[in-house]
Image: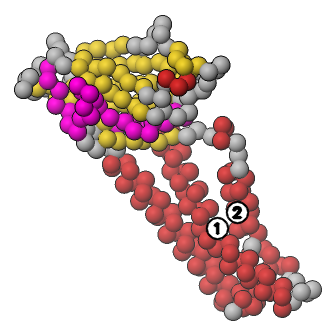
Amino acid sequence: MMYNFFYAKPQMKTQLQLLKAVLLVCNAAALLLYAFLRLLFYDFPFEVTDELGTIAKLLSVASGFSCIISLPFIIAAMLEYYKIHPVRLRFPRLKYMLPGAAVAILLVVLLSCNGNTMIAKGIKKDFGTGLTSSWSNMEPEKVMLVMNNEVLNHTDIPLGESFLLVNDNIKGLKVKEGKVSVGCSLTIRDKNGTALLDIKDLFEGRDTFDEKDAKMLKCTVSTGKPMEWEEKYDVAVTFWDKYGDGKIDNKVTIRCIDIP
C-alpha cells in the first residue's frame, strides 16, 4: 500500500483528495466555531479588521492542523519506500510533498515566534448577568458583578444602590520595578444612547499599584438620578495597562428597580 502511495497515480490522486477533504472539514469546523461564538456574543461590538484577522487565524490553524494530521502518513510512506528502495529514490515524486512540507515548516516557525510579538485576544462572558469582557494582552480569569459582598446572577439593581464590576485574577500587566499602572473609564448610557455619566479615568492620580495588589481590578458603579425605575442602562467599563498595551472592555446592561 505504501509503495502504491508513491508509484500508482490513482493512489496519489486518492491521497490528494483525502487531504482536500480534511482541509475542507477542518476549515468548515473553524468557520462554524467562529459563527457560534459570534452569535453567543452578538451584543458585543467589533471592528471589521479585527474580525477578519481572527477568521484568517482560525483558517490558518485549521489548515495547519489538517497538514499535521496528514504528516505521519507521509513520513510512514517515505520510510517504507526508502526501505524498499534505499538507493534509487525518484526525486520527481518530491513535488507532491513540497507544498505540504512548506506549510508544515511555516506553521512550526509561526508557533515558535516570540509570544511578545503576538497579540493575545479573547472574550469572556458571565451568563448569569450577561456581563461581557473583551480583552487584549491583559486577560481576566473571571468576570462578575458583586453587590453587598454577593456575586450576582442577575442585573436588577435597586435604584440608589451601588455594585462592583470585577475582573478577577488578571494576567498580562506589564511590571516596572514591582509596580503596575492601570487606567479605568466608566460610561453609563440610557436606552436612547445618551451618556448619563462619562468618566475618562477613575484611577487618575492613583493609578500605580504593587504587582501583587493588582490581580483583581474592580470598578464601583452607582445608580441614582437621573436614572428611573424599570429602565435599562448600558454600563461600559474599560481597564487598560498604562505601562503596556493591554486592555479589557466590559459591557453589561442593568435594570434599575425599586428597593425591595
Residue type beneath disc 1: Ile
Please say if 206 is above or below 31: above
Where is the C terminus found, in terms of image quarters? top left
Magenta region, residue range: 132-159
- Whole-percent x and y of residue 39? 33, 49
Where is the N terminus found, in terms of image quarters? bottom right
Precedes in sequence: disc 2 or disc 1: 1
* CB contact under 8 Å: marks 2 and 1: yes
- Whole-percent x and y of residue 20? 58, 73
Left or right? Give the position of 130 relative to 175: left
Q: How is the image coloured?
A: secondary structure
At x 47%, y 10%, the residue is 206
Q: Which residue is mark 1?
A: 68
Residue 61 visible (yes or no): yes
Q: Nearer the viewer, residue 201 or 24?
A: 201
Give the crowd class for mark 1: few <14, some 14-19, many >=20 residues within 10 Å: some
Secondary-structure class at tag 2: helix
Query: Is 139 contained in the magenta span?
Result: yes
Q: Which residue is mark 2?
A: 104
At x 59%, y 79%, the residue is 17
Q: Residue furthest right?
A: 87
Residue type beneath disc 2: Ala
